Image (cartoon, grey):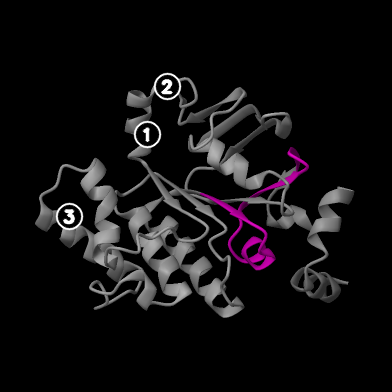
Amino acid sequence: MIEIKHISKSFKETQVLYDISTNFEEGKVNLIIGQSGSGKTVLLKSIVGLHDVDEGNVFFHGRNFTQMDNMERKGIRKEIGMVFQGSALFDSVNLEQNVMFPLKMFAEMSEEEARERANFCLKRVQVVDKNHLFPAEISGGMKKRVAIARAIALNPKYLFCDEPNSGLDPRTSIVIDNLIKEIITEYNITCVINTHDMNSVMEIGEKIVFINQGRNWWEGNQSEIWNNDNEEFNDFLFTSELTKQIRKSMI
């Protein structure tokens, strides 16, 4: 379990997060949702230590990540996989070398062992016989697959995804959602996804945290969405055509 306790974060005079507390459940798909500018990306990056928080603490299975020094954090970072919004692949190296990157940084492996592991991960995300290609030579959907392969290369306990469906068409988004769900189920990974894709919420979300104006406004599971009485959450939720259609079918 990942526990978030009273997290606040400002950039100069602008406060972005206000006293956020929640937990993300082990072995499940946990979603952070909210409008653009709500603070959900800042929250995600604060959890993994890309931003230092002003107040509060983050615990990974009872270990206080916030209070650790860089050397102590390195041990937990080996347990974390990260999929960035733009995939963040290195343009100057091929797909195989992209996936090998965290293995070279954190794993005690020979070159051959790292290559074998990288190719296993590429095959797991259904990128086959393309390890020699460069990021500029593949589609946006395939870039996301390679980013996921790189994120799982170290057999992480925790997988964080920042807008994994950004820039993808609806059909490819569903494929990426299903792939993430398959992988976290197969390897019992605790997954936290930052998204505004309501299809992701309805299809793979198990724990849902709604961030509004930098605050934890609502949280619950899929079955609780339809019976909530949170005005701000409903305003956000039912602007989606998908959720409008689902709600109409339930009436």
Asked if the magenta segment contains residue 202, the reply would be: yes
Ranked by sequence position, the earlier of labels 2 and 1 is: 2
- Proximity of marks 1 and 3: CB atoms separated by less than 8 Å: no
Name above or below for residue 179 compared with residue 62: below
> Which region of the structure is painted magenta?
192-217
Residue 142: percent from left, percent from top: 41, 73
Instruction: Identify residue type, mark 3.
Output: Ala
Q: Residues within 10 Å of mark 1 (few under 14, many from 20)?
A: some
Residue 164: percent from left, percent from top: 53, 61
According to the picture, the residue beneath numbered tag 2 turns out to be 68
Could you tell me how far apart the alpha carbons at marks 1 and 3 are, in whole angstroms?
Answer: 20 Å
- Proximity of marks 2 and 1: CB atoms separated by less than 8 Å: yes
Residue 115: percent from left, percent from top: 17, 60
Q: Which residue sits at x=53%, y=76%?
A: 172
Q: Which residue sits at x=28%, y=77%?
A: 128
Q: What kind of element bears circle 3?
A: helix
Q: Which residue sits at x=82%, y=71%?
A: 244
Q: Nearer the viewer, residue 83 or 209?
A: 83
Q: What kind of element bears circle 1?
A: helix
Name above or below for residue 102 compared with residue 205: above
User: Which quadrant of the rendered structure holds the C terminus?
Assistant: bottom right
Ranked by sequence position, the earlier of labels 3 and 2 is: 2
Could you tell me how far apart the alpha carbons at marks 3 and 2 are, in whole angstroms?
Answer: 29 Å
Residue 137's image quarter? bottom left
Q: Nearer the viewer, residue 40 or 126?
A: 40
Q: Residues within 10 Å of mark 3 (few under 14, many from 20)?
A: many
Q: What kind of element bears circle 2?
A: loop
According to the picture, the residue beneath numbered tag 1 turns out to be 76
According to the picture, the residue beneath numbered tag 3 turns out to be 114
